[in-house]
Image: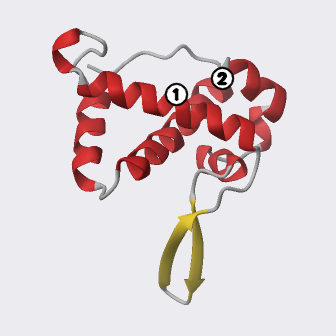
Amino acid sequence: MIAAALISVIGDPKRFGSGRDMAAFLGLVPSQHTSGDKVRLGRVTKRGDSGLRSLLVQGAQAALRAAELSGSGKMKDGKLRTWLLDLLKRKDTRNKAVVALANKMARMAWAIWKNDTVYTAAA
């Protein structure tokens, strides 16, 4: 469902220079307030396509839930699961971790789509 929505909204992934550009288009990155050498990141902008952003956030919530249920075998142990659990410890709220994961998922989708490759989970 998310892949079909990405194709319909984005069209061609090569119109973005990087995964961050696509994530910014979807409203999944913090706003930047830069002056001189200081970079200050604000809150997530929520600009862009709200329907696609909602799908990515819901998918991230499901993935986070699967990562937390370690004994049930919902998600294999690997780098992504380790990163998710560490992220959950670092963030002060669960919702921030979910949006960070949605951002990562959008960037991964852009890289896979642009390079025309198949996703392989890192061990």
Q: Residues within 10 Å of mark 2 (few under 14, many from 20)?
A: some
Asked which quadrant contains residue 1, the reply is top right
In the image, residue 68 lies at what x, y percent? 25, 28
| Residue nearest the observer in this picture, 117 or 56 | 56
Residue bearing the label numbered 1: 59
In the image, residue 37 lies at what x, y percent? 49, 86
* Color scheme of the displayed model: secondary structure
View extreme (top): residue: 73
Asked which quadrant contains residue 120, the reply is top left
Kindly identify the amino acid type of the residue bearing the numbered disc 1.
Gly
Position of the C terminus, as image quadrant, is: top left
Q: Residue at horizontal 24%, vertical 38%?
A: 85
Question: Callout 1: helix, strand or loop?
Answer: helix
- Label 1 or label 2, whichever comes before in sequence order: 2
Q: Residue at horizontal 29%, vertical 46%?
A: 87
Mark 1–mark 2 distance (CA, rounded to whole Å): 8 Å
Left or right of 114: which side holds 103? left
Residue bearing the label numbered 2: 2
Left or right of 90: which side holds 8? right
**Residue contact between numbered discs 1 and 2, judged by CB atoms under 8 Å:** yes
Q: How crowded is mark 1: few (under 14 residues within 10 Å), some or many (20 or more)?
A: some
Q: Residue at horizontal 70%, vertical 35%?
A: 52
